[in-house]
């Protein structure tokens, strides 16, 4: 009897239409964020929102293939209209990340408005233990953070990293594999680690 039941359960997923499964996954993702009805949350994207649904907002016509995460002790992510967030990109917020309209974020990009863990070794170990043991981290202290802003029409190349406190201006281009630690002016092209200006972009 048990073997028959296990066999039926094993066959159950095959009996569910793929479209229905995909629709269910999309509903689950949308339940964790405030996404415009015409925003597209692809199968590969992940929405890890530890805060209120309204703390992750995604605008009209934006396609998300990346991971967007807010942390228990803070975080807010606002994404404008007609953006593209590529696969294997990570947007992690404990304060605030604002991405303007028509922004292109390539694959493998990391955008962090915080340093992830405390600088103190002891505090870092306690933080790690709290994470793996499921402790309440809503009052976590000692993790430095500062808002990140990416202006309209910016383009972030693949495998680039943008660190806390950075503002990337309108129409700016960040080259592939660059590390951005300082503000980037409007209509400027930067490359390298740390990123340095090499030219100007165009409206």
Image: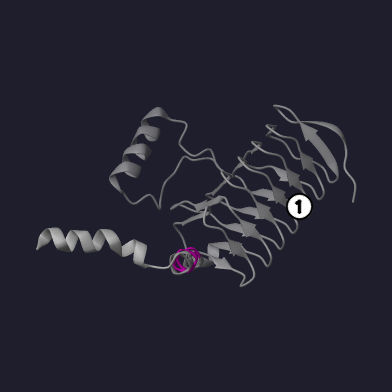
Q: What element carries label 1?
A: loop
* Percent of width and height locating residue 180: 69, 35
Name the residue nearer the viewer: 96 or 58. Answer: 58
Q: Does the magenta stretch include residue 26?
A: yes
Q: Residues within 10 Å of mark 1 (few under 14, many from 20)?
A: many
* Percent of width and height locating residue 103: 73, 53
* Magenta span: 23-29
Q: Quadrant of the N terminus?
A: bottom left
Instruction: From the image, tell me which residue sits under label 1.
Output: 151
Q: How many labels does the image show?
A: 1
Taking 186 as reference, is 92 left or right? left
Say which residue appears at 71% left-offset and 28% top-offset: 194
Residue 183 vs 96, above or below: the answer is: above
Name the residue nearer the viewer: 28 or 111. Answer: 28
* Percent of width and height locating residue 134: 30, 48
Say which residue appears at 38% left-offset and 49% top-offset: 137
């Amino acid at each position: 009897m048990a073997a028959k039941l296990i066999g039926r359960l094993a066959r159950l997923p095959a009996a569910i239409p793929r479209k229905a499964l995909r629709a269910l996954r999309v509903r689950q993702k949308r339940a964790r964020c405030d996404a415009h009805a015409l925003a597209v949350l692809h199968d590969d994207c992940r929405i890890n929102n530890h805060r209120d649904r309204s703390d992750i907002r995604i605008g009209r016509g934006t396609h998300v293939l990346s991971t967007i995460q807010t942390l228990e002790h803070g975080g807010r992510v606002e994404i404008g209209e007609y953006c593209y967030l590529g696969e294997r990109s990570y947007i992690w917020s404990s304060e605030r990340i604002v991405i303007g309209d028509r922004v292109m974020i390539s694959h493998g990009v990391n955008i962090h408005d915080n340093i992830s863990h405390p600088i103190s070794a002891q505090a870092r170990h306690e933080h790690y233990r709290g994470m793996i043991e499921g402790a309440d981290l809503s009052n976590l202290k000692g993790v430095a953070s500062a808002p990140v802003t990416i202006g309209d029409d910016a383009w972030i190349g693949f495998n680039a990293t943008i660190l806390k406190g950075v503002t990337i201006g309108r129409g700016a281009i960040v080259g592939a594999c660059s590390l951005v630690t300082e503000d980037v002016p409007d209509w400027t092209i930067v490359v390298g680690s740390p990123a340095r200006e090499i030219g100007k972009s165009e409206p």
